[in-house]
Amino acid sequence: MFEQKTIKRLRVKKRRWKRVLAAHGRNKPFYREHVKTASDITIDPLYTPADLADFSYEEELGFPGEYPFTRGITPSMYRGRPWRVRQSLGLGSASEQNKRFHELLANGVNILPVAFDLPTQLGYDSDHPMAYGEVGRVGVAIDSLADMETLFAGIPLDQAITILIVSAPAPVIMAMYFVLAEKQGVSWQKLYGIIQNDILKEYVASGNYIFPPKHSLRLVTDLIAFCTEHAPQWHPIAVSGYHIRESGANAVQELAFTLANAITYVAAAQEAGLQVDTFAAKIRFHLSSHAYFFEEVAKLRAARRLWAKIMKNRFGAMNPEAQKMRMHVETAGSTLTESFPDLNAIRVAYQALVAVLAGAQSLQTTPRDSMSPLPNVQAELVARYTQELLANEIGIMNSIDPLGGSYYVESLTNEIEKKATALIAKIEELGGTVSSIENGFIQQEIERSSFDCQKRIENKELLVIGRNTHLGEQQPPRYLPEMNPLFAEQQLTALKKLKKERDQKKVAAALLELRKAAQSPDNIMPAILNAVRAYATIGEICGILRKVYGEYHCPCSNITGEGERPKNTGQEVRVLIAKAGLDGHDRGAKVVANALREVGMTVFYTGLHQSPEDIVSFALEKKVHVVGVSTLCGAHMQVLPAIPLLLREKGAENVLVIAGGVIPEKDIPHLKSVGIANIFPPGTHTNEIVKYIRERV
C-alpha cells in the first residue's frame, strides 16, 4: 500500500517515538509497556502503515460482496438491508410456545426460533428416568410428531422462517418438521429455515451428544444430503463457535475449532458424493461477540476471509455463494454478571456494536438476566430493542465496513487469521477434528484457556464490575422463572395417551425398518421419516440408534485426572466434581476442578449426564472426602437431595456434599436441610471454595 522508502522511514520514526513513549509512561500509574489479548496476541500501543508493509488491498480486503469477502458478503450490506434480529424462544410446553409464535406473527415477525428442553436434545422421552425434573426446563419438550403439530398449530410452514436449535437428534426433529409440512400440504421445496445440526461442538462445548463422533457425523451428513435434494431452501447445518467460546475458548480458538469442525462436515459431504458448490452455499455459522472489542471485530472479519480461502483453495468451490460465510452472531452470556444486571445491558450493547461493525447477517442480543435459564419478558424486550436502537438511532448502517483500513484492525485481523490457520493445521496433524475430540486435545485447550481467564479475573489482571470490583454494592436475589407445576404432568399424560392409542404394529414395523437403515450405508432419513409418521417417539427412535451405534461417554482422564500434592500438606484430600442431570455446561465445574488440583487436592471428574446413583457410585469407588455438584438448568431440587441421601444409605454420611450453579436463594434452606453443606453461586472466588474444603476435611 505504501512505498518501501515510506515504510522504512516510518519504522525509524516509530522506534524513536517508542523511546519517547517509554520515558513518558514510566511515571504514569496506569502505563503498561506490554499488553496481550486473551488469545496471546501482543497489542502495540500505536499502529502505522509500517505494520501493513506487505498488505495487499485487493487480495486481503477487496470490495464487499467480492472474494475474499473480508468487508462483507454482499455489495450493499446494511445499505441494502439491515441485519436480521433473532432472539431465542423456549417455553416449557408446545402450546405455550405456539401462543408466543402467533404473537410474533401478529407483530410482523416471521422468524420463529425454537429451543428444546434437555431430554429432547439428548433423545429421551419425557417419561425417561433421566428426564425427571428436566422436562420443559430450558426449552420446549418434543416427544413426538403430536407435539410438533401443537407447536406449529395454525402456522403455515411456508410462511415462516423457522430456526430449530438442536444437534444430536437433529434428523428426528427435522423429520417431524417435514412430516408436519406434508400434513399441511406444504411442499418441502418451499420450506425456509435453519437447523443447527452441529454435533462436533457438542463434544467439546455444550455436552448434548448421544452417539460416538463417527456415527454422529454420518447422521449430520445424511441430513445435509437429504435437505440438499429435497428441501433446497432449507439450511441443514449451522456451525457454532458461540458455544465453544462460552465454554472458555479464546477468540483464536473459537475461530479455529469452528472452522475445523466445518472442514470436517464439508469433507464428509464431499465424500458422500455431494457437490460443494451446491450444498456449501447453505452452510450457516453461529459465532460469538465477546468483551474484547477490537479483537472481536477482527475475529469476525478474519473468519469470513479464512473461510473463503478454505472453500476456494482446499475444496475447489467456484461458486461465490459457496465461498461466503453467512454468520449469525450472539452476544456473550458468559460475560454478564449477577450483580448490577443493568450494566449487563451496556455490555450487550457494546458486543452488539461489534457484530454490526463486523458485518453479521443476523444478531441475537443476550438478555441482561441470562444467568437464569429463561430470562424475563422485560429483559428480552430490552435486548431486542438494543438492536433497533443500533439500526435506527446512531447511523451505524451508513457506511459498509467502517473499520476497514484501520492499521490496528487490519493488523489484528491478519494476526488472528494467522494464528487460527496454525491451530487448524495442528488439529490436522493430530488426525483431524474427530481424532482431536477423541484424544481430548480440543477439550484440553478450551479448559486451559477457561482456567487462565478465571485466574486473570481472580488476580484482578482483568477487572469486571460485579465480579472482582465494586462487589456487594448491588446483589439482586437469584431466581429462576417459575414453571407451571402442572406442565410436566400434562406432558407425561399426553405421552402415555399417545403410546396407548397409536397403531402399535406400524410403530414396530417402522422401528424395525429404522434399525436396518442404521446398519446399512443408505441415507437414514427416509426410515426416520416413516417412524415419525407412525408417531414413534424421539426416545424410541434414538433408542434404536443407541442400540446400533452405542453411546458416547467422554473419558474422564481427558478432562481432569489426579493431581500431585505439594510436599508436607498432610492428609490427601480427594474430591469428586460431578455434573448432575442432563445439563451439559461444565465450564464452571472444570474451573473448580483445576483450582482444587492446583492447590494439591486429588480431583476426579464424572463427566456429563450423571444420575445421583452414578455420582454416589463414583464417589464410593474413588473413596472421596468431598462431592461437589454443578447444576445450572433448574433441576437442582430434583437431583441434588438424592445425593446425600444415597451416601447415608451406603454408610458414607461423612462425605461432604457441596453444590454450585444457578440456584435460587429461596431453595437453599431446603437443600441444606437435606444434606447439601453449602451452595456456591456464580462468581464465587475459587479460593473461597478451597478454604471451605480445607477447613472441613
Image: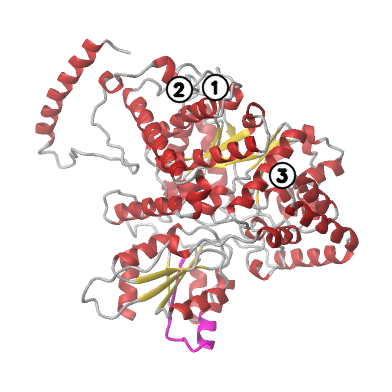
| Label annotation for residue 404 | none
Which residue is disc 3 drawn over?
Answer: 101
State if disc 2 and disc 3 touch (CB < 8 Å).
no
Q: Nearer the viewer, residue 524 or 473?
A: 524
In the rendered structure, which amino acid carries the disc numbered 1? Met
Q: Can residue 323 be found in the magenta stretch?
A: no
Q: CA distance from mark 1 to mark 2?
A: 9 Å
In the rendered structure, which amino acid carries the disc numbered 2? Asp
Q: Is residue 278 left or right of residue 524?
A: left
Q: Nearer the viewer, residue 430 or 345?
A: 430
Residue 65, image x and y in percent?
Answer: 54, 19
The magenta segment? 644-660
Q: Earlier in the sequence, mark 1 or mark 3?
A: 1
State if disc 2 and disc 1 touch (CB < 8 Å).
yes
Which residue is disc 1 drawn over?
Answer: 77
Disc 1 is placed on an element classified as helix
Q: Earlier in the sequence, mark 3 or mark 2?
A: 3
Which residue is disc 2 drawn over?
Answer: 401
Q: CA distance from mark 1 to mark 3?
A: 28 Å
